[in-house]
Amino acid sequence: MMLSNWLTNSHFVMLGLQLVFAIAHSGGAALRPFAEKQIGPRLYRVFFALLSLPLAVILIVYFINHRYDGWQLWQVQGVPGVKTVVWVLSAISFLFLYPATFNLLEIAAIQKPSVHLYETGIIRITRHPQMVGQIIWCVAHTLWLGTSFTLVTSVGLVLHHLFGVWHGDRRLASRYGEAFEIVKQRTSIIPFLAVLDRRQSLKWQEFLRPAYLGVAAFIGLLWWSHPLLIQASSKVQWLF
């Protein structure tokens, strides 16, 4: 099979869209201290959301419409149990992807948005839950779809989140100094590593929060609406 037969333009478009999103999202995060001084935390959060959310929607819709592009590397959708594994992994990924649901009023800029230095709940498992959640999501969807387009998409997402690990730690170190270094020593990037080497201990009562009920409800809603999301996305016409 010739390279041109499977390396479609959509592979490069997706990488380009991911790059634009990464620049906007990480760049916006880097500018946060300066921007909040100029326009205030609430207005900054509104502008950040108005920039990031449409780009995220474009990425999601483009991915759905092109997920079967390129080379079919493997096909396991008919294998018994694989669908269940994919859904379980996807559900777990959202538990890691949305730790910020603890501050919904701040996300909506109803309360004054703040940068928090956490060492509780899921942060005891990993200091960067969004990175872990994204990797789990990518593994699940790449396993299910098995296409070169999905693999390229997943590689781009993982690279962005690995950069986010470095970038996020750098911003927290700049903001909190020694306090962050103490948290950094007591937590780990790799899930459960700090627990296994006894730098950290899990406190399950910290997970008994309404926020996790909200995430569980979101997972249920996503499971129910998944076919509708695919159907709606298929109606979007692309120029590329």
Image (tube, grey):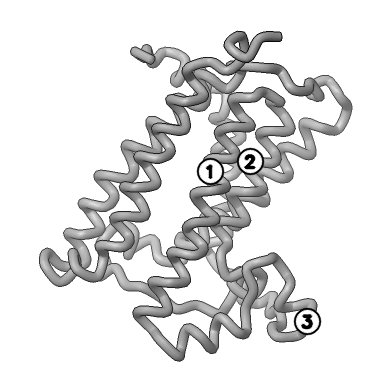
Image quadrant where residue 88 sits? top right
Is 45 placed above or below 192 here?
A: above
Helix, strand or loop for disc 3? loop
Helix, strand or loop for disc 1? helix
Residue 173 placed where, x, y %? 42, 79
Is 190 placed above or below 155 here?
A: below
Is 187 placed above or below 42 here?
A: below
Q: What residue sits right under mark 3 in the picture?
A: 197
Among the two numbered marks 1 and 2 on one chain, the one whose residue lies closer to the N terminus: 2
* Residue type (three-letter) at the residue carrying disc 2: Cys
Label 1 vs label 2, nearer the camera: 1
* Residue type (three-letter) at the residue carrying disc 3: Asp
Q: What residue sits right under mark 1 in the picture?
A: 157
Q: What residue sits right under mark 2 in the picture?
A: 138
* Residue type (three-letter) at the residue carrying disc 1: Leu
Is 46 placed above or below 165 here?
A: above
Quote the CA–CA distance across marks 3 and 1: 29 Å
